[in-house]
Image (cartoon, grey):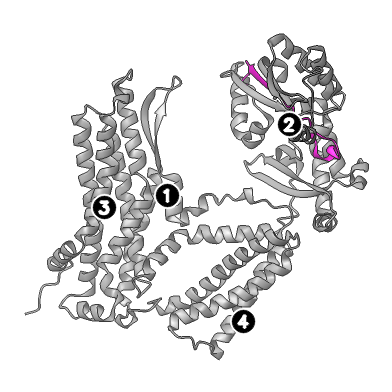
C-alpha cells in the first residue's frame, strides 16, 4: 500500500527543537530584557511617580520600551541564525546525502524546517508580549494596546526576515558564506547606489557628498530601509504632555510581509531543484555563478577603487581624478573577477580562454561606467535649473545668503559661467600658488528637490578686480550691509533685545579678565557694530577674500539677546530651510510667532572697526592697562611673563 503523503514531519521538528533550543532561548531572553524587564524597571523607577499623571506615565514607559523592542536589526540577526541552523544539513555533503536519503520528500523537509525556524521567532515574541502585558497590568499600566501593535510589527518583520534568510540560504553550499550573503542581500541596492554616487562625485564637476539621499527606492535594501523607517515614539501635545504612542512604518511591514510569501515560494522552488553535490560550493546554483562573478568584479572593483582614491586624494589633493579612477577601475575590476572565479572553482587555475572573453567584457563595462560620468552623458554637471523651476536659492561663500527674485536670473547666468570655466578653475585649484575659496550654490526647487553644487572659485586679484566674475559678484552680495548684519546679529536683528555681553581684555603684564557690559553699554556697542558694518569696516573680518593680511584681535565680543519674533540665525535657516518655511507660513497665517528665542553671537573684529574701538574707549573698557591685542601680539606678551 502506498504511504500517506505528509507535508510536515514531527520527528524532524522535535529534532530541531532539541538541537537548536539555545538559539530560540537566547532570542527569548533578548525579548524579555527589551520589553517586559524594561517595562518593569521603568515602572519601579521613582521618577515616573513624582508629579506625573498616570496617563503620561503609562505612555512614556510603554513608548520607551516599544521604541527599543521594535528595532529590526536584532530580529534580522536571529532570523539569519535560525535559517542557518535548520538548513545546516545543506552545507556538508555527508549530512545532505543522509537527510535526503530518508523516506521524506523535499516538500516535507522544506516545510518542516521552514516552520521550525519561523516558530522559533514567533513563539518567543508571543511569550514576551504576554509577559509584557502581565507586567504592565501588575504595575497599573493600561496602555497595552501599543504592545499589540509591537507584536504585529515584529511578527511581520520576523516573517519577512526569516523568509528572506531562507531564500538567501538556498544560493550557497557553505555555512560561513550564508551570513555574508544575507548581509549583502540586505544592503546590495543601497550599497550599489552609494558606490555610483561616490564615483559620480569624483568625476562630475561641482557635486557634493552631502547630496547623498537614496530615497524610497532603497526599499530594495530591506534591513537598511526598515531600520530608518520603522520606529515608535511618544506623542506630546503643545504643553509637552505625553498623550499617546505612534508606530511609524507598520504599512511598510505589511508590504514586506506580503513579499515574504514570494520569497518563501521562491526558496522552495530553489530547494526543490538544488543539487546535493553542490554542498560546499560558494554558489550552489549554476545560473547564478556568472552573476556572482560580475557582481564581485564590478562592486568589489569599484569599492577598492574608491578606497585607493581616498588615500591618493588625501596624499596629493588632485582635482582631475579621471585618469586615476580609470586605471584603478580596470585593475581592480579585473582582479576581483578572477578572485570570484577562484572562489567558485576552489582552485587557482582559472585562466581559461572562455573566461578571458568574459573578463574582457567586465573590463569594457568598467571603462564605459567611468566614461559615462566623465563625458557627463547624463548632463549632471552641466545641469542648471530654469528660473521657472526655482523656489529660492542660496549662495554660501563666507556665509549663506538668500537671493532675491531680482538676483536669481543673475545667479543662473553666473552658474553657467562657472561650468564653462571648469578647466580654468580646476587648474587654479590644483596650482601650488592657486588662491581659491569653496562656494556652495543651493537651489530649492518648486517640486521639492534640492539641487546643490560646490565650486572652488578663484580669489586672485584678477578675478576680484573683474566686477562681472562670479567671485566678485558673490562677494558684492555678501558685502551688502543688511546681509552682513543678518549674518552677525540674526535675521530680525532690529527687534533684538540685548541683555548680556562681554569682551576678553589683556594687559602688558600678561593678565586677562572678562569685562561684562550692562544694558546701556550694550546699546552703544551694538550701534557701533552696525555703523562699522555700514561703513564696510567688518568686511576684512567676515569675508575670507577680504582678509588678505588683516589680523583679528584676540579680544572677541560676545552678545546674548532675546528676540520676541522667534528670530533664527542665517545658518539655521540655510541648513533647514523647509522647516523654517513652515514656521513662516504659520506666522503669516496667524499673524503671530510661536515662541520667542534666546540667541548668542561671538563677533571677531580688528583695527579697521574704528567705531567699535572708539566706543570701547569712550566706555573706559579699554584704557592704559587693558588693551586690544592680536593673537600674535598677545602670545609675545604671554611669553615675556
Label 4 or label 2, whichever lies nearer to me, is: 2
Q: Is residue 172 above or below residue 44?
A: below
Label 2 or label 3, whichever lies nearer to me, is: 2
Residue 106: percent from left, percent from top:
23, 74
Mark sitting on residue 360: 4
Name which residue lies at 20% across and 77% down.
99
Query: Mark 2 = which residue?
Result: 641
Tell me the element at label 3.
helix
Q: Earlier in the sequence, mark 2 or mark 3?
A: 3
- Give how far apart the Cα atoms at labels 4 and 2 are: 72 Å
Tell me the element at label 1.
helix
Query: Mark 3 = which residue?
Result: 27
Mark sitting on residue 601: none
Identify the magenta region: 542-566
Q: Residue furthest left?
A: 1
Of residues 104 and 546, the one drawn nearer to the viewer in this rendering = 546
Residue 630 visible in the displayed image = yes
Query: Mark 1 = which residue?
Result: 226
Q: Residue furthest front?
A: 641
Residue 404: percent from left, percent from top:
77, 32
- Give how far apart the Cα atoms at labels 1 and 2 are: 62 Å
Tell me the element at label 2.
loop
Residues at marks 4 and 2 touching, judged by CB atoms closer than 8 Å:
no
Amino acid at each position: 500500500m502506498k504511504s500517506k503523503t505528509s507535508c510536515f514531519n514531527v520527528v524532524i521538528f522535535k529534532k530541531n527543537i532539541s538541537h537548536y533550543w539555545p538559539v530560540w532561548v537566547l532570542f527569548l531572553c533578548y525579548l524579555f530584557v527589551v520589553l517586559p524587564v524594561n517595562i518593569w524597571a521603568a515602572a519601579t523607577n521613582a521618577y515616573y511617580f513624582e508629579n506625573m499623571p498616570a496617563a503620561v506615565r503609562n505612555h512614556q514607559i510603554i513608548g520607551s520600551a516599544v521604541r527599543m523592542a521594535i528595532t529590526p536589526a536584532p530580529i534580522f540577526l536571529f532570523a539569519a541564525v535560525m535559517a542557518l541552523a535548520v538548513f545546516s544539513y545543506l552545507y556538508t555533503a555527508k549530512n545532505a546525502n543522509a537527510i535526503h536519503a530518508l523516506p521524506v520528500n523535499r516538500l516535507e523537509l522544506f516545510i518542516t524546517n521552514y516552520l521550525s525556524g519561523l516558530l522559533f521567532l514567533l513563539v518567543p515574541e508571543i511569550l514576551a508580549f504576554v509577559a509584557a502585558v502581565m507586567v504592565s497590568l501588575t504595575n497599573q499600566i493600561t496602555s497595552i494596546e501599543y504592545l499589540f501593535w509591537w507584536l504585529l510589527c515584529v511578527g511581520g518583520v520576523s516573517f519577512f526576515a526569516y523568509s528572506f534568510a531562507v531564500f538567501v540560504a538556498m544560493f550557497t553550499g557553505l555555512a560561513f558564506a550564508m551570513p555574508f550573503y544575507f548581509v549583502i542581500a540586505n544592503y546590495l541596492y543601497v550599497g550599489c547606489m552609494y558606490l555610483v554616487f561616490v564615483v559620480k562625485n569624483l568625476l562630475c564637476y561641482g557635486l557634493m557628498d552631502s547630496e547623498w539621499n537614496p530615497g524610497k527606492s532603497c526599499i530594495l535594501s530591506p534591513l537598511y530601509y526598515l531600520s530608518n523607517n520603522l520606529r515608535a515614539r511618544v506623542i506630546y501635545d503643545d504643553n509637552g504632555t505625553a498623550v499617546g504612542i505612534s508606530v511609524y512604518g507598520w504599512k511598510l511591514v505589511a508590504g514586506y510581509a506580503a513579499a515574504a510569501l514570494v520569497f518563501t515560494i521562491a526558496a522552495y522552488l530553489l530547494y526543490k531543484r538544488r543539487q546535493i553535490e553542490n554542498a560546499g560550493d560558494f554558489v550552489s546554483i549554476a545560473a547564478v555563478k556568472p552573476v556572482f562573478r560580475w557582481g564581485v568584479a564590478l562592486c568589489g572593483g569599484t569599492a577598492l577603487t574608491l578606497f585607493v582614491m581616498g588615500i591618493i586624494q588625501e596624499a596629493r589633493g588632485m582635482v582631475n581624478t579621471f585618469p586615476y579612477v580609470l586605471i584603478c577601475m580596470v585593475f581592480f575590476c579585473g582582479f576581483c573577477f578572477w578572485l570570484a572565479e577562484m572562489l567558485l572553482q576552489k582552485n587557482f587555475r582559472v585562466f581559461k580562454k572562455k573566461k578571458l572573453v568574459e573578463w574582457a567584457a567586465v573590463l569594457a563595462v568598467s571603462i564605459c561606467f567611468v566614461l559615462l560620468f566623465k563625458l557627463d552623458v547624463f548632463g549632471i554637471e552641466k545641469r542648471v535649473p530654469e528660473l521657472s523651476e526655482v523656489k529660492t536659492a542660496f549662495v554660501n561663500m563666507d556665509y549663506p545668503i538668500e537671493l532675491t527674485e531680482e538676483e536669481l536670473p543673475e545667479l543662473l547666468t553666473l552658474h553657467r559661467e562657472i561650468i564653462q570655466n571648469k578647466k580654468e578653475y580646476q587648474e587654479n585649484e590644483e596650482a601650488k600658488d592657486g588662491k581659491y575659496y569653496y562656494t556652495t550654490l543651493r537651489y530649492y526647487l518648486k517640486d521639492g528637490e534640492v539641487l546643490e553644487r560646490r565650486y572652488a572659485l578663484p580669489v586672485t586679484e584678477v578675478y576680484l578686480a573683474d566686477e562681472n566674475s562670479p567671485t566678485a559678484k558673490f562677494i558684492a552680495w555678501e558685502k551688502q550691509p543688511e546681509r552682513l548684519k543678518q549674518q552677525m546679529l540674526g535675521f530680525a536683528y532690529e527687534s533684538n533685545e540685548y541683555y548680556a555681553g562681554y569682551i576678553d581684555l589683556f594687559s602688558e603684564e600678561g593678565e586677562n579678565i572678562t569685562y561684562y557690559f550692562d544694558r546701556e553699554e550694550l546699546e552703544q556697542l551694538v550701534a557701533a557694530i552696525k555703523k562699522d558694518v555700514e561703513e564696510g569696516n567688518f568686511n576684512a573680518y567676515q569675508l575670507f577674500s577680504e582678509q588678505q593680511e588683516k589680523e583679528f584681535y584676540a579680544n572677541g565680543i560676545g552678545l546674548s539677546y532675546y528676540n520676541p519674533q522667534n528670530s533664527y540665525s542665517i545658518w539655521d535657516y540655510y541648513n533647514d530651510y523647509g522647516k523654517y518655511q513652515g514656521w513662516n507660513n504659520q506666522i503669516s497665517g496667524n499673524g503671530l510667532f510661536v515662541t520667542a528665542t534666546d540667541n548668542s553671537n561671538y563677533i571677531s573684529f580688528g583695527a579697521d572697526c574704528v567705531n567699535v574701538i572708539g566706543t570701547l574707549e569712550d566706555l573706559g573698557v579699554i584704557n592704559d592697562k587693558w588693551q586690544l591685542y592680536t593673537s600674535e601680539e598677545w602670545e609675545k606678551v604671554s611669553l615675556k611673563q
